[in-house]
Amino acid sequence: MATVEPGIARHYEVSGLEERILAALADAGVDVAHLRAGDLEAIDEFHIGGVAATRELIDQIGLKPGARLLDIGSGIGGPARFVANSAGVDVTGIDLTQSYVDIAASLSKRVGLADKTRFVQGSALDMPFAKASFDAAMILHVGMNLPDKPKLMSEAARVLKPGSVFAVYDVMRLKDGALTYPLPWASNETMSFVATPDDYRSAAAAAGFSVTAERPRGALAVEFFAAMRARLATAQAEGKKPSPGLGLVMGEDARTKMANVTAALEGGILAPVELILRLV
Ligand SMILES: C[S@@+](CC[C@H](N)C(=O)[O-])C[C@H]1O[C@@H](n2cnc3c(N)ncnc32)[C@H](O)[C@@H]1O
């Protein structure tokens, strides 16, 4: 299982990513010497629906100020910073990709959130945290890279306090059908472990979670990519550079990845799904 992880981390690496982000923002007129968390949100929320989807997910957790939240697969830290800022919680992010962990910490420092967010390198399937360390957890668009959903759930259950909420927002398989690669989370099929909502529910139940809410977000996903395509087409028609967006983190083949995931979403094969779990 661990053998797939180095390849997955390499899939996400984009050389000089932080410099590219800062250069693109400066180009778009942002004062990068005085960066604010909001300046980053079109780039650092690496999941379908962006910051609005993060807000809608965490509104279902019921976070209290000062609570300790774990963000599993925290990427370059957008969701962690948004929740730290908006809900006044302390967020710990864990991510497999070392350069993402470093960029997440650096961006938090730049926007004045270094004391509310910390980022560590590690695997969701073997987390370096003690039992009952956190009051809540979230995972956004990471499970597609995790071959062992029961291990994800048992690790989450181990590090959460009894009664805690675990908010899941992953791309899941809703029906059979071939996927075309690359996808935003996988260069090829050896890195992709998309599972059904049923797989998640049974792994969660075995780890001691009950499902308190479930919501497929396929329509939101189709709209999200349509808006992104429209933004790129408008910029092209006007002969302008598109405003900085997720293409920066998706790397050179961003357009192919977006086209492939859009086809699977429009075909109803995949959809992002929210699952709100409570540790019994
Ligand atoms: C699509 S990005 C989502 C990032 C972030 N959750 C967000 O929404 O902005 C997927 C992330 O999962 C991380 N990841 C993949 N496999 C992982 C694992 N086994 N343990 C921890 N993180 C992992 C990747 O490094 C990447 O940062």
Image: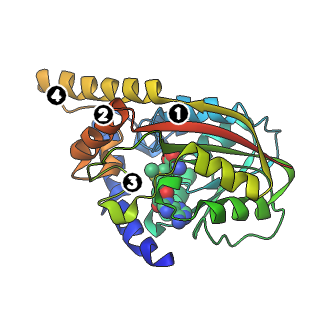
SS at badge 3: loop
| Residue 104 x %, y % | 52, 56
- Image vertical order of residue 188 relative to residue 272, above or below: below
Q: Position of residue 255 (x, y in %)?
A: 22, 42
CB within 8 Å, label 1 to label 2? no
Q: Which mark is residue 240?
A: 4
Disc 2 target residue: 28
Choose mark 3 or mark 2, whichever is in front.
Answer: 3
Residue displayed at 47% across by 39% down: 174
Numbered disc in front, either 1 or 4: 1
Q: Nearer the viewer, residue 131 or 115?
A: 131
Judge left or right: residue 80 versus residue 50.
right
Position in image of residue 260 (x %, y %): 27, 42
N-terminal label among 1 and 3: 1
Q: Position of residue 262 (x, y in %)?
A: 31, 35
- Residue sitting at 40 percent across and 66 percent down? 8
- The label nearer to you, 3 versus 4, is 3
Q: Residues within 10 Å of mark 1 (few under 14, many from 20)?
A: many
Q: Amino acid at mark 4?
A: Lys
Q: Residue at x 60, y 37 (%)?
A: 274
Q: If you read the primary sequence from the N terminus, does the residue marked by circle 3 or circle 2 appear first? A: 2
Distance, label 1 to label 2, CA atoms, is 20 Å
Can you tell me whether the CB of the residue at mark 3 lies under 8 Å from the nearest atom of ligand 1? yes
